[in-house]
Image: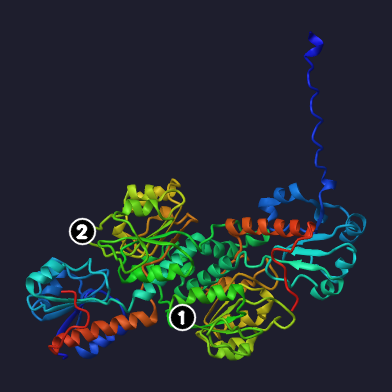
Amino acid sequence: MASDQATTPPPPPLPEIQSHDLSQVIVLHPPPVFNYFMDLFSKKFHLLKAWESPLPLHEFLTNHAHSAQAMLCSGTGPSISADIIRLLPSLRLVATTSAGLNHIDLTECRNRGISIANAGEAFSEDVADLAVGLLIDVFRKVSASDRYVRHGLWATKGDYPLGSKLGGKRIGIVGLGSIGFQVAKRLEAFGCNISYNSRKRKDFVSYPFYTNVCELAANSDVLIICCGLTEQTRHMINREVLLALGKEGVIVNIGRGAIIHEKELVQCLVQGEIGGAGLDVFENEPDVPKELFELDNVVLAPHMAVFTTESFKDLCDLMIGNLEAFFSKKPLLSPVMNE
Amino acid sequence: MDSITVLMTSPMSDYLENQLKDRFNLVKLWTYSSKTDFFKHNSHSIRAIVGNTKIGADAELIDSLPELEIVSSYSVGLDKIDLRKCQEKGIRVTNTPDVLTDDVADVAMGLMLAVVRRVCECDRFVRRGLWPKGDFRLTNKFSGMQVGIVGLGRIGSAIAKRAEAFGCPISYYSRSEKPETNYKYFSNIIDLAVNCQILVVACALTEETHHIVNREVIDALGPEGILINIGRGSHIDEPELVSALLEGRLGGAGLDVFENEPEVPEQLFGLENVVLMPHVGSDTVETTDAMADLVIKNLEAHFLKKPLLTPVV
């Protein structure tokens, strides 16, 4: 009989995951990973995108981020200052896509008991690779001689001026953290001699340790800046240090622009007080001192040391992992320890 | 020894020139307007040639110098010297191995990093004022890329050692397998090219290795692959390389040498995935002086009837 052939009623529709069911993550300014992977974050979290709001930042936070417990930030965009933190009464986690922490008021976070997660060692290799790439470029004039060839000068002007041998050079690493260690490991294979200056001596290496950066410079042919930017390291590399490095000396910076006193660096380069520089970071990015454009012994990069597809994907996974761990009350994947 | 006449084939080093002038009667080939003029004045006095990668000692030159006893090359490469003729005539040949190994390996690494991480492109980006308009894009990661080396001699081994520090797995193709290394051996260059992401040419140029990197090898390396040449321009079929790059069939190239130096195919000048250097592999102050010293020491040893330091023939 027809009535016995019961048509099973259609199953109830699955509840749509409303964005307000997802945990809130406040984002003041899109981190570079959002250019490629924002949707991976949007699927899992309710992103409060301050930069898209017409409201001034303070108003947006007061009106919309009152219950946000987590923030995702990067080295670009507004600093995570005490003022901003005070507008976020529920904030318990700041996750930054950078390794550096100089844009975060660490004292305020400590006082509020706010945890911090950063990029950990996700791109230490990439940054080290660029540091070595910049160093070889300065010593062997890779970019400068490439320019020479592309302008057709090899055929008309003859052989290019000689470079400098990398092997046997004394490398002074400023900051022997994860990145500094990867740089040292690589340059050892080129026959370089490694020394370092760091906040503390590191027991796991046998490289000579210098307590102050000026002494390190005086005993090095190359300085590679691999440390973080703090009150202590701001403008640490000044004219005194550069003069100690000397007329043949080369400096490579893949840390933060403000670790070097940029005006004094430019002056030293223009006056020939140091031999050359490889710079991925600057005091006032994206502004780069125009005097450097005249120099062939300088190699310039637009803060791209971490810009590899592998790093960005790893970083994305790491940040999502940190946020998920936070919201499920599990240990963070890459917490920054209070020191 | 200033009664001994030494021929320098081209201007290669002021330091070497001065050292030769101090010790010998130096004749400079490039100061003569014609070959006939040169031969008229010097054929019977020249006992040594100091050649380089531009002008060595070919059959014609050797045959025209009956008193020639030794060719001391200011290079490690011997492709510009007619070795067979030297052997036949009992002429000694020396080169400059070891002193330039590190520098050439460093340039190979510099080219790899520059191509993969787009260092030169970044430098152009900043200098052109493009950074305020937006960030640079993403590149590939270099550490861990598979590196394949053609020729695991002194220079090839030095490159391998450096690349290993970046976590790069190393494979190679060489005339003979080197079981004392941990690197993966391939018995032919096609298999090597298929199995690596960066192919580095580091072997000597001989009849066998002329155009060893041809269309087939380039295709095997593929549109993501990168070719690095610090050997000799003629290792690569240059027109094939150029069309592969223009057509996107090869991912990128870092070149220090070209088939017809100092001419470089102009079609490469507009490419961002290419880095071009003007044959500077051993061009550092330290190494060029060391090479010059080795040339001088070999010449002195020969004329003092002592053992040569770095003989090839």
* SS label for mark 1: loop
Reading the image, the residue beneath label 1 is A192
Tell me residue A21's x, y (percent).
84, 47
Quarter of the figure with residue A121: bottom right
Could you confirm whether marks 1 and 2 are on the same chain?
no
Res B158 label: none
**Above or below, B28 relative to B200:** below
Task: State whether residue B69 appears in this view.
Answer: yes
- The type of residue carrying mark 1 is Cys
> Label 2 near label 1: C-beta < 8 Å?
no
Residue count near mark 2 (Cα–Cα under 10 Å), binned few <14, some 14–19, many ≥20: few
- Image mark 1: chain: A
**Above or below, B38 relative to A29:** below
Q: Nearer the viewer, residue B271 or B214?
A: B214
Quarter of the figure with residue B277: bottom left
- Image mark 2: chain: B
Q: Nearer the viewer, residue A63 or A318?
A: A318
Judge left or right: residue A265 versus residue B112. right
Tell me residue B150's x, y (percent).
33, 61
Judge left or right: residue B256 versus residue A96. left
Judge left or right: residue B102 versus residue A268. left
Q: Which quarter of the rendering shows the N terminus of chain B?
A: bottom left
Tell me residue B47's x, y (percent).
12, 81
Label 1 to label 2: alpha-carbon separation: 37 Å
Q: Which quarter of the rendering shows the C terminus of chain B?
A: bottom left
- The type of residue carrying mark 2 is Glu
Res B207 label: 2
